[in-house]
Image (cartoon, rainbow, N blue to C red):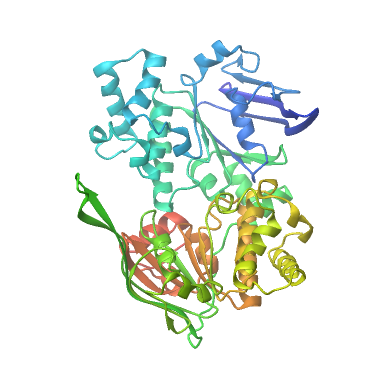
Amino acid sequence: MSEPLLTVQDLSVAFGQGGRETLAVDRISFDIKKGETVALVGESGSGKSVTALSVMKLLPYPAASHPSGRIAFKGRELLGLPEHEIRTVRGNDITIIFQEPMTSLNPLHTIERQIGEILLLHQGLTGEAARARTLELLTQVGIPDPAGRLASYPHQLSGGQRQRVMIAMALANEPDLLIADEPTTALDVTVQAQILKLLKDLQQRLGMAMLFITHDLGIVRKIADRVCVMRSGKIVEQDTVERVFASPQHPYTKDLLAAEPKPQAAPLNPSGETVVKTDELKVWFPIKRGVLRKTVGHIKAVDGVSVEIRKGETLGVVGESGSGKTTLGLAILRLVSSDGTIVFMGKPVQGLRFKEMRPFRRDMQIVFQDPYGSLSPRMSVADIIEEGLGVHSPGMSEETREQRVIRALSDVGLDPETRFRYPHEFSGGQRQRIALARAVVLEPTFVVLDEPTSALDMLIQAQMVDLLRDLQKRRELTYMFISHDLRVVAALASRLMVMRDGKVVEAGAAADLFKSPKSAYTRALFAAAFNLDIAPDGATAQ
């Protein structure tokens, strides 16, 4: 047996604030061998990222402390190293990829400068030598036209390209251990599959070990050799991936595996009333150049899309980032300008002015992807949920409004007594429930759900799916569910629409499309999402 590359033994992490100490990690132990991939899995707050940051000594010391334990890398104790010595380990021997590359990359520096900075600090490379190595790294990670991207800034790259740049920076010094902290959470399934394949290929080529942090068990199955399941700061189970998936021992592990969304298409309602109908809907954004800002072209975000959604149904809209999914939802709600026909509840709404649209707003609501960004941090939960009632029912008594808020919170599974708290006092899943309560308190007919589960843990995601199903039955809601996560869409949708570059690639009953996708693009999406084998005739097999 080879000696472990990294040994974490009896590690605890505590955070002190105002004389109180909170234990975030509680006496965990694991090791990683050279060339091995170990996954840390668990819900938000389980201690996964804190463990990873401890390995690189990136926690906010002295607020963070280690009441117990040791971390050894190649037999060298890391926790006791002074800052100038740990810097020689970071970037050279151990590197990290963070969850959100846009916040990790400097928006003011070009890609060449950001990678070049690492090469200068750790290898002393400058000028042509640094540029040649940067091009080599960008080519390795699959950036198209790497020479043309050297002068690009982070905002000029797609999410997948930004993550590839982060990987290039992490691999610049060919480390022995790569820590990947939720590196694919916000990516489309096809881009996610590409990034996972890239990491696996680079790992084999460089012979490096990997600590992969995620809440997605589907990713663990694809990339890891061993898995450690964390809950409330403890490792509750660890073993090989095959053993844990085949025969989980701990109840929490069993719950996580059971929480993976299962394809279960919702029933159609062909005789139901048509709630929303569009015909040849277009949203084109002008491209302006020159001193006079002349229009030289258009970005066709939505290009001739026709939709029909009946009462009680869920239309799942899927596709990669930039396919036009969210823009379509915003156009239907008249939140962005568009051309074409929009009919809501039998009445044409295209072209109506702001005041003329107000009577329809009550019946059409939206739940945004990021609840933290869409909920005002200065308003209590009660004020946030009640705000719409004040706009649409100004004559409603204060007592009635409070009862409606209490009912909405109960319907989404939150304790009504928490309504006087503020958004920052809730977890991500709870904030998403608050956003949903804000939408349903008006008792709407139609709700657009824009990626409402993308950033949630598996268990919370499963709870949200059950909650949305339950609300739909009890309140006869009609949903437009926008997502790049086909597993969640498969658990909710009655009808499915696949979009690419602003156009509809394929549409129809969800059960039929999941069983037998017709287009090559849809088959590629399904294969990436479900690990399916796609037959030449388009039929899918597990």
Name the residue: 39% across, 53% down. 321
Q: Position of residue 270 (x, y in %)?
A: 48, 85
In this rendering, the count of numbered labels is 0
Name the residue: 24% across, 18% down. 128
Q: Position of residue 315 (x, y in %)?
A: 47, 71
Q: Position of residue 296 (x, y in %)?
A: 19, 53
- Nearer to the camera, 54 or 243: 54
- 256 shown above or below 316: above
- 438 shown above or below 36: below
> Would you identify the image quadrant in which residue 318 lies?
bottom left
Tell me the quarter of the image containing the N terminus: top right
Report if residue 195 is visible in the image. Answer: yes
> Would you identify the image quadrant in which residue 317 lies?
bottom left
Left or right position of 364 against 171: right
- Nearer to the camera, 538 or 362: 362
Left or right position of 129 against 219: left
Report if residue 257 is visible in the image. Answer: no
Name the residue: 40% across, 28% down. 169
